[in-house]
Image (cartoon, helix red, strand yellow):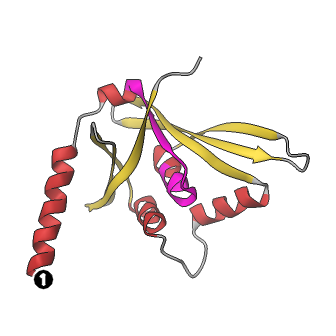
């Protein structure tokens, strides 16, 4: 039996000291996951569809999936223990006989989000995690307003 989930989207990626704050949410709520700067940069590049001269790590994983006729079907942020989030990467693969196989892997939510952004796959959060996280919608709105003001002055 599967647990209930909420679909979310990346609403913002904001550099923060030696990490990045990835804001995930929907119309109801937005929460933040802090990721290392490299993965935060990858997520931003995928969302902006920036072409790179050479493949980075997540690009390589995506190329490998394609080579095996597989793709990221969806990702789920399924657990929160203290301040540590846990995720599942759901991969759909098809063999030469067109038989489909679903593979579920334990993965860091940051990598899950990057792979979902790369392959335009949906991101879900378990209801359990959703109920536990603090709504950061106002914080993100404030950051976006501040950036707009700075852009208007510059």
Name the element at disc 1. loop
- Residue 137 against residue 141 in the figure, above or below: above
Locate residue 25, reporting x and y percent: 33, 43
Judge by depth and name the residue closer to the eye, 98 or 76: 98
Residue drawn at (77%, 38%) of the image: 101
Q: Which residues are magenta?
A: 113-128
Quadrant housing residue 55? bottom right
Locate residue 83, reporting x and y percent: 33, 35
Count of numbered labels shown in the rendering: 1
Locate residue 47, reporting x and y percent: 44, 63
- Residue at the disc numbered 1: 154
Residue 138 forms part of the magenta stretch: no
Q: Is residue 38 left or right of residue 24?
A: right
- Residue 150 against residue 146 in the figure, above or below: below
Locate residue 29, reporting x and y percent: 27, 38
Residue drawn at (78%, 54%) of the image: 69
Judge by depth and name the residue closer to the eye, 112 or 30: 30
Q: Residues within 10 Å of mark 1 (few under 14, many from 20)?
A: few
Residue extending farthest right: 97
- Residue 29 against residue 3 in the figure, above or below: below
Which image quadrant: the N terminus?
Answer: top right
């Amino acid at each position: 039996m599967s647990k209930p989930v909420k679909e979310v989207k990346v609403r913002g990626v904001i550099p923060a000291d030696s990490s990045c704050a990835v804001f995930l949410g929907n119309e109801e709520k937005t929460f933040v996951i802090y990721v290392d700067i490299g993965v935060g940069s990858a997520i931003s590049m995928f969302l902006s569809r920036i072409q790179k001269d050479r493949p980075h790590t997540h690009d390589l994983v995506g190329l490998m999936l394609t080579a095996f006729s597989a793709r990221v079907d969806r990702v789920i942020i399924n657990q929160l223990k203290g301040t540590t989030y846990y995720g599942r990467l759901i991969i759909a693969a098809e063999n030469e006989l067109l038989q489909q196989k679903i593979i579920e892997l334990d993965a860091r939510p940051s990598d899950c989000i990057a792979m979902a952004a790369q392959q335009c796959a949906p991101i879900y959060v378990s209801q359990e995690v959703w109920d536990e996280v603090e709504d950061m919608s106002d914080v993100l709105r404030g950051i976006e307003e501040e950036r707009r003001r700075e852009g208007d002055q510059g």
